[in-house]
Amino acid sequence: MISRSTIQKVNDAADLLDVVGSFIKLKKRGANYLGNCPFHNEKTPSFTVSASKGIYKCFGCGKAGNVITFVQEHEKLSYPEAITWLAKRYHIEIEETQQSNAEKEQRLVEESLRIVNNFATAYFQENLTTTEGEAIGLSYFRERGFRKETIEKFQLGYCPEAREDLPAKALEKGYQKDLLVKAGLVYERNNQLGAIYAGRVTFPIHNQSGRVIGFGA
Ligand code: ZN
């Protein structure tokens, strides 16, 4: 865990205007700065930064927060990752507090689940472009009126009817069986592994920082 004093130092050093300004062009408007929002598409700037208050707000999409939430959202990072990102930028040494074994274990599991969920997202997306995926999955999305951009944006996918395919590909890549089961992607029956969502369209479920934490079908 990152120590409290490191977080405090990062909070003190991090300059919202500097950070936002490195991603988008800002113009001074009265007491605030204004630019095109990095979180939604716009031609007329509605993204406002108050340097004195250290907060931003977009009057187009409603996103608002401080320098840490900006880094989290913009770079798709967790809170500790955003702190690390800012610490690097402002040359602050990160001091870690001792982690218990249980905490370390928990972190490891979370990280492994994140990686395996990313693998599954890519796998489902790929399978939407196969003959089977197009015939069943893509045609279903089209009937529902989903456009190509929507399908891509929401990372929609398809899990092939051949149940053994996903576990086989995952094991081949070195992912452990237990992890696949824990992630809710694969079941085990009579020593055989099968994909839970076989023959169904899939959509990833994201957490607040935009990460895939599971799937729906
Ligand atoms: Zn916006």
Image: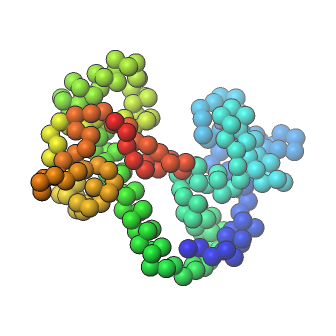
Ligand 1: quadrant of the figure: top right
Using the image as rendered, state which of residue 138 and residue 129 is in the foreground.
138
What is the tally of numbered marks visible in this picture? 0
Quadrant showing the C terminus? top left
Using the image as rendered, state which of residue 11 and residue 116 is in the foreground.
116
Q: Which residue is pictured at 31% across the width and 38% down the height? A: 125
| Image coords of residue 194 (percent x, y) | 18, 47
Q: Is residue 136 left or right of residue 209?
A: left
| Image coords of residue 192 (percent x, y) | 13, 53
Q: Which residue is pictured at 58% across the width and 80% down the height? A: 97
Which residue is situated farthest in the right direction here?
30
Q: Quadrant location of residue 26?
A: top right
Above or below, 4 against 66 in this view is: below
| Image coords of residue 154 (percent x, y) | 43, 35
Q: Quadrant location of residue 114?
A: bottom left
Above or below, 155 against 138 in this view is: below
Q: Quadrant location of residue 32?
A: top right
Above or below, 74 against 39 in this view is: below
| Image coords of residue 191 (percent x, y) | 12, 57
Answer yes or no: is residue 46 visible: no
Q: Which residue is pictured at 54% across the width and 50% down the height? A: 209
